[in-house]
C-alpha cells in the first residue's frame, strides 16, 4: 500500500495536473490507490493524498465495499442550488470530523480506467465524496470549509500527535 500524506503537509496543497495518457502505468497506479483506500477503510482517495499530482481519484461508496469507481480528469458542476451538510472525515486528517455544506447533486464528466469519457448525475454520499476528492486535486482540504479557529485547533492537535509518533 502507498503512504497517505497527512495535514498540514504542504504537498497536500499542490494543484494536480490533468492526466495525459490513460495507459497500463496509470492503471497500475489506480489499482495501488484502490488497495490503499480499502486498507485504510476510506470510501475515497485522491492521487494528491498519495503524493501523485495528477487529476485522478478512486472511490467506493457501496455497503459491500465491492463497487470501485475511477474518475480521471473529473469535472463537476452543481445541479440546482440546494445544499446539504455532512460530517466529513479525511484519511489525511485522521480522527477529526467536521460538518461541511456542499451542493447536494452534481453532474460529473470524467474518463474511466480505459480512457473512455462518461457522464453521471450524482447525489447522496457519492456526490459528497466526489466533491471531497476533487477538492484534494485542487489542493483543498475539508478543514478549509470550517472556521480558522477550528482549523488551527485541529492543526495543533495533529502536530502534537505526529510528534508523539516520531
Ligand atoms: O480522505 C479521503 O478523501 C477519504 C474520505 C472520503 C470522504 C470524506 C467525507 C465524506 C465522504 C467521503 C474518507 O473516506 S473519510 C472516512 C469516512 C468513511 C466513511 C464515511 C465517511 C467518512
Ligand atoms: Zn480527504
Image: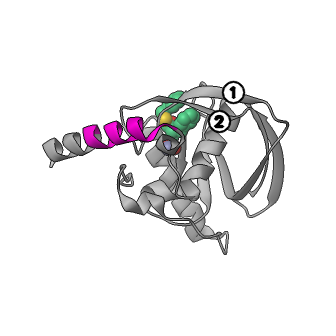
Q: Is 83 above or below relative to 68?
A: above
Q: Is residue 148 magenta?
A: yes
Q: Image point 39% across, 37% down: which residue?
A: 149
The label shown at residue 128 is: 2
Q: Image point 73% across, 30% down: which residue?
A: 83
Q: Is residue 164 magenta?
A: no
| Dot in front, 2 or 1 | 1
Q: Nearer the viewer, residue 81 or 59?
A: 81
| Ligand 1 is within 8 Å of the C-beta of the residue at disc 2 | yes
Q: Nearer the viewer, residue 153 or 127?
A: 153
Q: Is residue 34 left or right of residue 115?
A: left
Distance from the alpha carbon under mark 2 to that under mark 1: 9 Å
Range of magenta residues: 146-157
Q: Secondary structure at mark 2?
A: helix
Magenta portion: prevailing SS class:
helix
Residue 57 image position (x, y, % from top left):
60, 53
| Ligand 1 is within 8 Å of the C-beta of the residue at disc 1 | no
Q: Is residue 127 left or right of residue 45?
A: right
Q: Image point 56% across, 70% down: which residue?
A: 25
Residue 9 image position (x, y, % from top left):
35, 56
The label shown at residue 84 is: 1
Q: Is 132 above or below relative to 48?
A: above
Q: Is residue 92 left or right of residue 43?
A: left
> Picture quarter containing residue 152?
top left
Amino acid at each position: 500500500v502507498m503512504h497517505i500524506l497527512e495535514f498540514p503537509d504542504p504537498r497536500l496543497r499542490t494543484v494536480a495536473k490533468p492526466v495525459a495518457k490513460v495507459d497500463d502505468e496509470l492503471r497500475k497506479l489506480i489499482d495501488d490507490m484502490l488497495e490503499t483506500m480499502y486498507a485504510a477503510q476510506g470510501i475515497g482517495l485522491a492521487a494528491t493524498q498519495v503524493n501523485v499530482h495528477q487529476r485522478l481519484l478512486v472511490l467506493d461508496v457501496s455497503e459491500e465495499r465491492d463497487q470501485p469507481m475511477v474518475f480521471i480528469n473529473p469535472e463537476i458542476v452543481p445541479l440546482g442550488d440546494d445544499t446539504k451538510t455532512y460530517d466529513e472525515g479525511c484519511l489525511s486528517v485522521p480522527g477529526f470530523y467536521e460538518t461541511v455544506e456542499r451542493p447536494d447533486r452534481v453532474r460529473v464528466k470524467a474518463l474511466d480506467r480505459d480512457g473512455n469519457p462518461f457522464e453521471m448525475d450524482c447525489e447522496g454520499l457519492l456526490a459528497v465524496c466526489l466533491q471531497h476528492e476533487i477538492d484534494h486535486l485542487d489542493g483543498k482540504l475539508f478543514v478549509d470549509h470550517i472556521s480558522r479557529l477550528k482549523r488551527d485547533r485541529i492543526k495543533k492537535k495533529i502536530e502534537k500527535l505526529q510528534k508523539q509518533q516520531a
